[in-house]
Amino acid sequence: MAYGDEPRPQDADILIAGAGLAGLTAAFGLAKAGFAVVSSGPSERSGSGRTVALLDRSVAILEALGLWAAVRTQAAPLRGLRLIDASAGLFPARPVEFHASEIGLDAFGWNIENARMAEALAAAIAKAPHVERTLASVETYDFGPEVVDARLVDGRLIRAPLAIGADGRLSKARRAAGLEARLHRYPQAALTALLAHRLPHNDFSTEFHTRGGPFTLVPLPASGPAENRSSLVWVMADKDALRLESLDDDALAREIERQAHSLLGAMRIEGGRGFFPLARQVVPRIAGPRLALIGDAGHVLPPIGAQGLNLGLRDVEAIIACAAQARADRRDIGAPDVLAAYERARRADILVRTSAVDGLNRSLIAHFGAIDFARGAALSALSAVGPLRRLVMRHGVGPRFTGRLPGS
């Protein structure tokens, strides 16, 4: 290729497109494993009341990378989970409680504001060797047989044997590689908000199952004068979202308190709030020539069951392991067999979690007596049968982390 007056390509081992939470974690982890990394793209805007519940496996991954200490100081533990059937179905079940101590954990996970976690990751990357952070996003890709040439919007050309698409559900990297994405839009929207409330949450996350979808309150740490705080994810029908979106903060807080059955007392909305359409996106192939997809670029789930970023962090864990193994074997880190190994490592986990979240959501919005009965019977069984309850808890937090990440 002739470059003429164009700048010469900048060589790297790995180009990461996208600077959300999964992309930043991948950049830090791969650089720590000794790869020369370019992390491209503007910092993700993380407002609108969004938080992430990092489950046990994700905590272990962050701990192995040396990132957990900075994140934990701004997160709240989730030591219990309470499920309440508020669906007004024909066969309502009694509330069910799960305790992390039943499966030998101090907490199922930890809840942190997206913006706080992004700040912690950005600070860690700023001090890390082997990683260059640029706000310029990728404008075009050329996936060649031996390298990827990625031209940034600032005119620079980055050349690497492997690109990682961490650029979200509309991933330009995925589209440039010709990888298909199948989008399913639900007739629902989700409200996210940060709340201060009068009564303590006692490290319990509470999920009300309603006809519109789950209404979930997740603990947050105290902040300033607000001693009792939680995040909210309220999934509801589109028409209800339109009505609530028009309310001011005080009126919306009263609606939230009513929907929570005043479990945490009077509510106050802190900062921004967001309304987002609910969708599920399936990507049949999460790897292509010289490209691996992670996070929302490879799978999009409704915000139910805290699976989104937790799946993304397991993507990060897998691509680090595959790239490090290829390097140890003196193989090309972007070769087809390496990317096929990454896809095999992730496919079953993604499929199982996506199907489970989709099934739960559909069971709530379906108005069929048989489904109501099955859901009520399942909750009753979880309440009464200890071994079953513990099995479900272990499955819910994901596979345990038993190894070490390269560089940790």
Image (cartoon, rainbow, N blue to C red):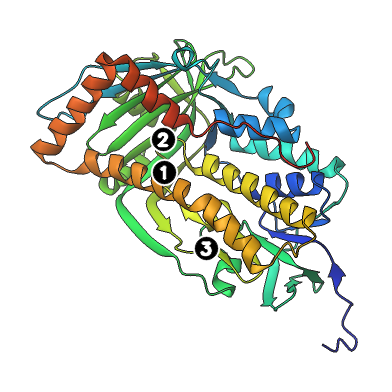
Q: Is residue 289 left or right of residue 349?
A: right
* Amino acid type for the residue under numbered disc 3: Leu
Q: Residue furthest front?
A: 329
Q: Residue at the spot x=47%, y=42% of the render?
A: 274
- Residue 406, position in %: x, y? 76, 42
Q: Residues within 10 Å of mark 3 (few under 14, many from 20)?
A: few
Q: Which residue is mark 2?
A: 305
Residue 44 can be seen, yes or no = no
Viewer-nearest residue: 122 or 45? 122
- Count of numbered marks: 3
Q: Give the SS element for disc 1.
A: helix
Q: Give the SS element for disc 2.
A: loop
Q: Is residue 280 above or below residue 95?
A: below
Mark drawn on residue 170:
3
Nearer the camera: disc 3 or disc 2: 2
Q: Residues within 10 Å of mark 2 (few under 14, many from 20)?
A: some
Is the N terminus in the top left, top right, bottom left or bottom right quadrant? bottom right
Asked if the residue at tag 2 contacts the one at tag 1, i.e. Cβ–Cβ closer than 8 Å, the answer is yes
For the residues marked 3 and 2, what is the alpha-carbon distance in whole angstroms? Answer: 23 Å
Q: Residue at the spot x=18%, y=43% of the render?
A: 366
- Residue 100, position in %: x, y? 47, 17
Q: Residues within 10 Å of mark 1 (few under 14, many from 20)?
A: some
Asked if the residue at tag 3 contacts the one at tag 1, i.e. Cβ–Cβ closer than 8 Å, the answer is no
Q: Which residue is mark 1?
A: 353
Among the two numbered marks 1 and 2 on one chain, the one whose residue lies closer to the N terminus: 2
* Amino acid type for the residue under numbered disc 2: Gly
- Residue 292, position in %: x, y? 61, 61
For the residues marked 1 and 2, what is the alpha-carbon distance in whole angstroms? Answer: 9 Å
Q: Is residue 2 above or below residue 237?
A: below
* Amino acid type for the residue under numbered disc 1: Arg
Nearer the camera: disc 1 or disc 3: 1
